[in-house]
Image (tube, rainbow, N blue to C red):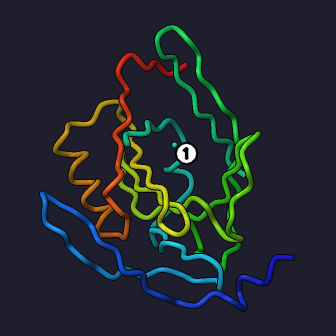
């Protein structure tokens, strides 16, 4: 049974350590705690309409269509994103589920849009365990991507295991 998120959510902070150019930076970021998981704070200016459309993963109810053609082989998975309980944030908080994947461990959102510009978004999972830097452009300049990854660290992401997604030869289908 899922407890009422409205009754349980409380403001909290999470201490995060980001590593930038071999220097460790510790910071405390706002988050929500529902008694089970921490949830990053969503971008307060988030609006769904500008967020819809094609994005490229540069480092993973709205239809989520992850599609790519790589080395002549189509790769596709179709999932769904539904708004999370408003107690977790007014906008930019989603429960995303793909077929054949286990359900999220936490009751609240598993995809939180932490920061959104016209062409780049930082999407974080609950407990700060998974980070996506999404771009409208397939190939970002390294300096631009580095700046957004650094921003994700400031927002609480651990940058120790960031892996850049190679978009070479990947064609949108």
Residue that mark 1 sits on: 52
For label 1, the SS is loop
Residue 97's place in the image compared with 54, above or below, is below
At label 1, counting other C-alpha atoms closer than 10 Å, the crowd grade (few under 14, some 14-19, many 20 or more) is few
Please give the name of the residue rendered at 37% of the width and 39% of the height, measured from the top-left corner. 58
- Residue situated in front as seen by the camera: 23 or 3: 23
Where's residue 94, x and y in %?
A: 63, 60
- Measuring from the top left, give residue 70's x and y in whole percent: 48, 16
The residue nearer to you, when weighing 101 against 121, is 101
Q: How many marks?
A: 1
Which sits in the foreground, 167 or 85? 167
Q: Is 90 above or below relative to 112? A: below
In the image, what residue occupies the spot 34% across and 49% down?
Answer: 162
108 lies left or right of 72: right
Give the quadrant of the C terminus. Answer: top right
**Which x, y percent locates residue 135?**
38, 41
Determine which quarter of the picture holds residue 159: bottom left
Q: Pick the residue in front: 88 or 39.
A: 39
């Amino acid at each position: 049974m899922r407890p009422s998120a409205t009754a349980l959510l409380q403001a909290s902070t999470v201490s995060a350590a980001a590593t930038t150019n071999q220097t460790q930076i510790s910071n405390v970021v706002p988050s929500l705690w529902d008694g089970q998981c921490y949830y990053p704070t969503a971008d307060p200016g988030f609006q769904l309409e500008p967020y819809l459309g094609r994005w490229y993963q540069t480092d993973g109810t709205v239809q989520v269509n992850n599609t790519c053609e790589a080395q002549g082989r189509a790769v596709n998975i179709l999932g769904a994103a539904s708004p999370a309980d408003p107690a977790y944030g007014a906008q930019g908080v989603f429960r995303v589920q793909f077929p054949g994947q286990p359900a999220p461990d936490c009751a609240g959102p598993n995809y939180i849009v932490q920061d959104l510009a016209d062409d780049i978004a930082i999407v974080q999972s609950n407990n700060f365990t998974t980070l996506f830097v999404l771009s409208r452009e397939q190939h970002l300049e390294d300096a631009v991507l580095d700046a957004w990854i650094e921003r994700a660290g400031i927002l609480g992401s651990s940058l120790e295991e960031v892996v850049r997604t190679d978009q070479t030869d990947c064609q949108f289908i």
